[in-house]
Image (tube, rainbow, N blue to C red):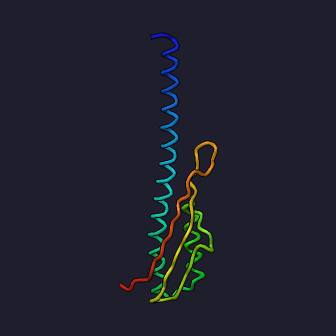
Amino acid sequence: MTLDEANTKRLVLLLWVLVAIFYFYLSYDYIRVTMSDRQFTDYMQYVVQIAGNEQRPAKEIRELLLVKAEELALPVPGSGITVLGGGDSLNVGVNYDVDIDIPVIQRQIYTKHFEHNIKYQRK
């Protein structure tokens, strides 16, 4: 094996390692966002059940959801939360988008849209 062949093989290996790191980072970012959204949805269900039982106002529900979204680092805008009805007819909807970025340069490569609609369920 000549020196040029060895250098070419090292370069190819380096490129494959960089591609693997790139895809690992994208996958990690996507999985992290999806897991945070799942936690947010569980919390949303909990808040809707409590708020429906206790006749809580829409403003309080919105504030609780915004605090939890901030805690989970989810970009949920206040305008993305819709609270309709109250008590037994409580219905809460949340819509937001999360950008999945390219590593290092932090440019958006993909936008994941989340849409949730939770209704109060009498137990």
Front residue (pair 68, 114): 114
Front residue (pair 66, 34): 34
Q: Residue furthest toward the left? A: 123
Q: Position of residue 84 (x, y in %)?
A: 53, 85
Residue lying at 46% horizontally and 59% vertically, measured from the top left: 35
Q: Position of residue 30 (x, y in %)?
A: 49, 53
Q: Is residue 82 above or below residue 8?
A: below
Q: Is residue 65 left or right of residue 41?
A: right
Tell me the quadrant of the picture where the C terminus can be found: bottom left
> Number of marks in the image?
0
Residue lying at 44% horizontally and 89% vertically, measured from the top left: 88
Q: Position of residue 87 (x, y in %)?
A: 48, 89
Residue lying at 60% horizontally and 81% vertically, measured from the top left: 59
Q: Is residue 77 left or right of residue 113?
A: right
Front residue (pair 57, 118): 118
Front residue (pair 118, 113): 113
Q: Position of residue 13 (x, y in %)?
A: 48, 27
Tell me the quadrant of the picture where the N terminus can be found: top left
